[in-house]
Image (cartoon, helix red, strand yellow):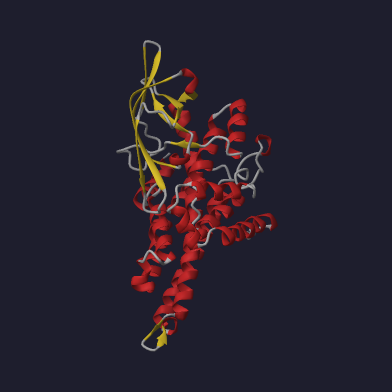
Amino acid sequence: MNLSLNEEQLLIKNSAEKFFLDNLSFEQRNKILTSDGKLCEDLILKSKELGWYGLPFDQKFGGLGGNITDVMTLIETFGASLHIDPYIFSLLLPGKIIEHFFDEDKKSHYLDKIINDNIKLAYCFAEPNIRFDIHKLNCKVYLEENKYFLKGKKMLVLAADRANSIIVPAIDKDKNVYLVKIDNTSKNFLSNKYKIIDDSDAVDYEFDGFEFNENDILVKLNYEEYKKKISIIFDYLTLAVCSEALGVIEKMYKLTLEYVKTREQFGKRIGDFQVIQHRMVEMYIIKEEMRSLNCSAQVSFSNNDPKERIKSISLNKIFLDTKAKEAAQDCIQLHGGMGVANEMSIGHFFKKLTFLSMLFGDSDYHYKRYELVDKI
């Protein structure tokens, strides 16, 4: 099987790399992170002109009809460039929710709007005390005097800081799941915005009897159907996270290789020491193993075999949380004290990889998931 990129995918990769080279140097990124958010929005607006927002979606909805490898190729360049656009959470996650859950009319309406950035959505997938099980819903919907109310908490809502509306999944006493669209500027619920380890923003929400209208219900379906669809979506997103991490580890390897070729110790470049050369070879092998696992997972999505897909995705995440994280730690160690200095980009890549390794399940969670898949 030929797993090399085709002409279109190379074009996506090369155009993205050139865009980031021109618009997102390490110094420019630091400037954007310390700004009021306008510089970030300006950068996202520029990137839209390259068609990135339409890439994952069908042409009949105004997208470009890109396949899974097209999308993962783009996301890998995001990782290698430390892109600050929360693309996975501001576009892919709400977009895939719309694709899998909405009827045709709502798909056309909402996909067109998010592709053109006329509406910004964030999906509230995480709750307290559920660990990494995205199937669990403790957030409740209840009806009193023909009025709908929402009670519960959502946490780590990524891209919510730039969202006009949030989509909140909640469950009623009859095990029906509601996807409720809520105005993010409303003052009738509590929210707390904070920075996370990779310098991006997240928001926690608390709904204590929050009233909403029937028109705010985007979808109502039974829990088993919700569970089946959300599993596919989050396997796709987990692969996107692993693809971004692949870009991160590729860049960390290159930065470390460049560093050991120039850094001198005891009158010699440290890259001339055999032990350092062996460690660099081990890193190279790890990143290439990671790439092979990523390609295998992309193929699993085309085979329509849920067990194969689940196993492939879990293997990717296990590898990210173990071998890839160890390789990233080696990169930091070879840089010495400079590896954790804010002025060096290598430390920022490490923070990004650390966050990605915990997102959507750590290695313990995915070991158990892999083990249980044959019992489904």
Q: Nearer the viewer, residue 118 or 236?
A: 118
Q: Nearer the viewer, residue 181 or 354?
A: 181
> Is 60 situated above or below 327?
above
> Is 105 situated above or below 284?
above
- Splitting the image into 4 quarters, where does residue 266 fall? bottom left
Residue found farthest to the top: 145
In percent of width and height, residue 310 lies at: 47, 46
* Quadrant where the image shows the C terminus: top left
Q: Is residue 360 visible?
A: no
Q: Residue at x 40, y 53 (%)?
A: 199
Residue found farthest to the left: 129
Q: Nearer the viewer, residue 305 or 213?
A: 213
In percent of width and height, residue 163 lies at: 48, 37
> Is 42 situated above or below 189?
below
Q: Residue at x 61, y 60 (%)?
A: 18
In percent of width and height, residue 62 lies at: 66, 37
Left or right of 20, for residue 352: left
* Quadrant where the image shows the N terminus: bottom right
Residue found farthest to the bottom: 267
Q: Is residue 29 visible?
A: yes
Q: Nearer the viewer, residue 361 or 300?
A: 361
In percent of width and height, residue 132 lies at: 36, 43
Count all numbered tags in the image, as a single digit.
0
